[in-house]
Image: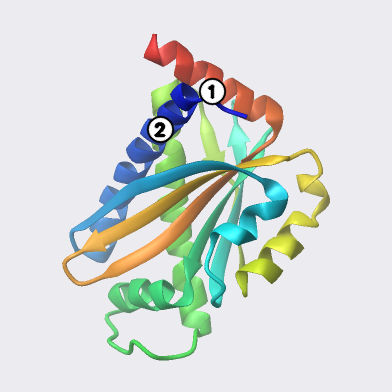
Amino acid sequence: MLNSQQLDALRELGNIGAAHAATTLSTMLMSNIEMEVPEIDVLDIGKVHEHVGDELSAMVLFEINGEVSGGGYVLLHIPKNSVIRLTNAMLGMSEPDRDLTEMDQSALLEIGNIMVSAFLDATATLLNIIMLPSPPSLVIDMPHAAFQSILAMQEFADINEVVLFRTELHSDQHKITSNLFLLPNKPMLDEIVRMLENLMK
């Protein structure tokens, strides 16, 4: 378990990554968007679903590649209402109550790729390493079911803890809630924390 100083360092990392992602998203949507990380927590991987709402959501999953020990994943969770606000803004639509379509899914993959790439890029720049996301995969389901199917994958066998960055996106037109989960193998989490502690000295 991380101590308060290590959590503070991770929160700062999250805020830097979030600011970078918001700038990139603002450019893409041609709308002023700010993004903050009001909450960060380290969770047992089996209890992740307890920390998100139980409404239909999109989950965009990326593997982290680059100069990190052990590897890990980033999972972007966006509830359906926020998905529609985001894709409406991206596609120039104004239908708040509608079902998700293939067009939404395509837009989500692009938005997720931009947000996570920007987040990892800012993180990597701060730590002076290379971190790159794999091509994304998308699951649309109730969070509990989606997490169960994702965590059942063999790749997650060595991951015990999840770092939750609860992110909020604000703009003049939209209020968008999302969560960014960092799912690191233990060597990766230890390495990131060690790098952050060295930066704070």
- Looking at the picture, which amino acid does disc 2 mark? Leu
Depth check, front residue: 70 or 102: 70
Q: Is residue 136 visible?
A: no
Query: Quick check: 12 above or below 38?
Result: above
Q: Which quadrant: the C terminus?
A: top left
Reading the image, the residue beneath label 2 is: 13
Marks 1 and 2, the one that precedes in the sequence? 2
Depth check, front residue: 147 or 32: 147
Reading the image, the residue beneath label 1 is: 193
Question: Which image quarter: residue 187?
Answer: top right
How far apart are the alpha carbons under marks 1 and 2? Answer: 10 Å
Q: Residue at x 35, y 47 (%)?
A: 38
Q: Which quadrant: the N terminus?
A: top right
- Looking at the picture, which amino acid does disc 1 mark? Val
Question: Which image quarter: residue 17?
Answer: top left
Residue 147 position, x and y percent, is 68, 62
Q: How many marks?
A: 2
Residue 78 position, x and y percent, is 47, 66
SS at circle 2: helix
Residue 63 position, x and y percent, is 63, 46
Q: Residue at x 47, y 15 (%)?
A: 197
Depth check, front residue: 29 or 200: 200
